[in-house]
Amino acid sequence: MDTVGWWSLIRFAHVAGAALWVGGQLALSLVILPLARHLLAPEAKDTFTAAAGRRFGMLTGAVFLPVQLATGLAMAWHKGITWGSLAEPGYGRTFATKLALFVVVMLAAAGHGIAHSKGRTDLARSLAVVSLVGSLGVVLLATALPAT
Amino acid sequence: MTSIASGPTSTGDARYPSRFRESGVKARHLRAHVLVVAWLGLALLAVAAQDSLSVSRWLAVHMFLLGAVTTAILIWSEHFAVALLHARVPDERWGTARLATANIAVAGLLIGVWSATPVLTAVFAVLLVAAATAHLVMLVRLGRGALGGRLKPIVSYYRAATAALIAGTLLGWLLSNGGAGPDRYAGLRLAHLHVTLLGWIGLPVLGTLFMLWPTVLGVRMKERTTKVSRWVLALTGSGLLVAVTALALGWRWPAVAGLALYAEGVALAVNLFVRTVRGHRPVSAAAVWMLAAATCWLLVAVAADLALLASRSLTDAQSGIDTLMPVLLIGFVAQILIGALTYLLPVVLAGGPQDREAVRAVLERGWLPRLVVLNTGILLAALPLPGPATTTGVLLAALAGAAFLGLALAVLARSGRSPEKGTSHNPALWGTTAGVALTVLAVLVANSGGDPGTGTSASGTSHAATGDVRTVAVTLAHMRISPARVEVAPGTALRLKVTNDDAQRHDLKVENGPATPMLGKGDTRVLDLGTVTDDREAWCTLPGHRAAGMSMDIVVKDGSTDSPDGHSGHTTTATDGALDLGADFSPGWQARDAELAPAPGGRLHKLDLHAGHTTVEVAPGVRQQMWTFGGTAPGPTLRGRVGDVFEITLVNDGKEMGHGIDFHAGSLAPDRPMRTLQPGERLVYRFRAERAGAWLYHCSTAPMLQHMGNGMYGAVVIDPPGLPKVDREYLLVSSELYLGTPGSTAQVTKMRQGDPDAWTFNGVANQYAKQPLKAKTGERARFWVVAAGPTDGIAFHIVGTVFDTVYKEGTHLLKPGDAGGAQVLDLAPAQGGFVETTFPEAGHYAFVDHDMRHAEAGAHGMVEVTD
């Protein structure tokens, strides 16, 4: 239990969840949707992209988000992070910024869904890319945090 | 009359705007103004980030001036030059290339300075100079063969201004890489400020106003305008040249004279502008009022600048001139930009007269409240009011600026939309840009204040392990950090109590560690570094300050048993304020070479020795007039073997004081050779060294306490027969150091009471602590020591070694074969000898006068032994 303990399992769930979520977004926007646009008839394409988006959104809300929040909270508690320490330069501030960026990314993703349902395609696509690039930023900040 | 002056009043469809109304030119203007607005937005962001990012104030100023204003001047000076010279529109592609190069260069410069990468800064400074030179060449070539209108002289303003941009860029680059050094920093910085603000920005604004002011007012230009504009350029241009050159060289009065010329030129122009005003209803009241207010602020700022320079030294004037910055930046530059754009944007962006009125209506929305808020803000920021008032002022000004920015954006978006719809939208690009911007912002916020891992929160609990917490007072002043070196034992928890004593703002950032926020004068912050295990550096993060010398070293030293500065819990600084031995020596300072060369061949040694007065650095940053033999204290070292003859020609180079010499190494009747030589006299002192030893020589003129206490001593080394060769031989002359005017009552009192300011080896306190002697493991080293006094002897000891050889006053007290060892070579004043030892392993071996009062006040050095 020394090297692979319970805490490493929790950390694994957190990292794997992030990787799958970012990877899923990348796969959707770089592979699946462009192909759908090329290969499918306009009507089928619209239905397909809407369905793909909805399913990914559901996965996010039902699996990724709860897993990330639960594991993240557990690790923060384990490390002994307090509200006060979030403002301090160094670990606290980096961590707080990462959380803030994560919130922004989630808002962008939610905005993407809303914009899409209202038929504002351009805005929806912009927000999707914001969410993707922003989530890479979250990963960058996460790698800047020292090992817990 | 040219069309420029009469245009907008009559038909509203003047000739010159039509020359630019082809869609190509319009599109270019649009693109270029998007750049201007983008830079303005970034500058506002940087202002907002002022507390979390130390360079953000610098960034805000440069994003505004070097980004937005420079782009605007490049566009408009070309635009107006074409109109005024009636020249053909130059090749658009080249214009775009110049503008793009300049913007890339500015972005590169900002990144270079922000990330403190000198190579980047240098490359982009060169690129900016290249873009400016190309602009200058374009302006000069436009003038050739062009018809030239009545207002042709205005183009010369643009040419002079572009030359000023080149000079400003070079000065700025010099400041950023520290080429200035701490002494000339103030002068060069002032030169940079003046050449950029009054030259690159002031000159084209003044020139353009000659044309723009009547146009905006809707009146005819005065007949005298051409003549006056020539005069004003001659006055402002030459005045600025003189002022900037003088400032760069640190000459105050020529700078004041040059600035007075400049002020006179501005006053002359303002006089003409005032006379141009008539009762007419102006074309754009908003533009008129803003241009007028801006010009007033320029006049106010130049007058205040002149008064400051005339009444204070350059270094002191700096802080006063810094408080003028809001006036110049917001009151003059920003306001003139807003005023000019209010009038000009409708002219270039609109499709027809109706459209123009519509655009103008948008830009003039709420102009009166904006004008009042902006100028109230500037007034609050400029007046010496308490902090909250200043902050309110800056906020008000920023609010008014942001309001205009919003209107300008609306106008630009409106014009950008109208020609073709939808093609410019690229969701992926917009999304990527927004995402990257968010991420960069997040990284900036995360990095502000300190690095992960070494920050206070991460290591906050680890102090308890070692128990040693050491607090060192650190002062920021005169572009220096004092002490410049802090030595701590490994495992010490270090706290730096940082105080800014300088008139300008500074901060302190520790490598891989925390940083203070920007500190105003008198502000103090405590930086908790946690447990220090590695050597670290700390510096002021303001652009150019580190390069100019504002850095300090935190050195981890094994706490050797009696190293005078290895103990935790104490600072290395002199706390009584007399001498700061932890400070830095001046740049370029070199320790006196302590290596002793072997005796030269031949039995007769001849030497010309000049007695005189020399000013030298005797302690870190402290210069003192010394009385010297051969220009140094101690004087030159003589070395020979038993039986050698020394023939010294002593010349008194002094102007008012008699000197003599007394060599302890030779025996003779003192009467003639040791007599006092009056200034200009000389004598030949000849002696045979009959006996071996480390001998003193010194001035033989009374009062000897003063002559020796002020530096007139040296060493003669006569090798004992059969002296074995060693790997290293050093000579250290120990003495006291009395600061103050030589011979003054205060200094002589200290000598009489035996209360020196410091004790030294070879004349300079702490010199071998700063530049350690070098040796290799296992090498045998011989240290010759002569105690020159005048009052104190020495107990010479090398930490971490045992002497196996001691030779004192002509005899061996200990030889390598003996069973015993020695720890100290004790010498009474004027005695001499040597010790020998081998360094067992690599490390730092401090050598000290084991009278710790002496050691802690300068009489210690270091031998750095490497494998």
Image (spheres, coloured by chain):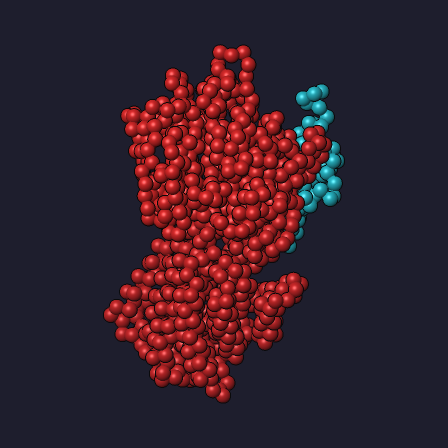
Residue B393 location in percent, x, y?
62, 66
The answer to whether residue B27 of the structure is visible from this angle is: no
Q: How many marks?
A: 0
Residue B294 location in percent, x, y?
51, 72
- Residue B283 appears left or right of B134: right
Q: Which chain is red?
A: B
Farthest-out residue, bottom? B279
Residue at 53 percent of width and 48 percent of height: B747
Residue B684 in the image: above or below residue B194 = above
User: In terms of depth relative to the viewer, which is nearer, B321 or A47?
Assistant: B321
User: In terms of depth relative to the viewer, which is nearer, B260 or A60?
Assistant: B260
Q: Which chain is cyan?
A: A
Q: Quadrant of the N terminus of chain B?
A: bottom left
Residue at 35 percent of width and 42 percent of height: B610
Residue A10 location in percent, x, y?
70, 30
Q: Quadrant of residue B698?
A: top left
User: In terms of depth relative to the viewer, which is nearer, B27 or B714?
Assistant: B714
Residue at 63 percent of width and 54 percent of height: B522
Residue B611 in the image: above or below residue B822 = below
Residue at 40 percent of width and 76 percent of height: B211
Residue A121 in the image: above or below residue A142 = below
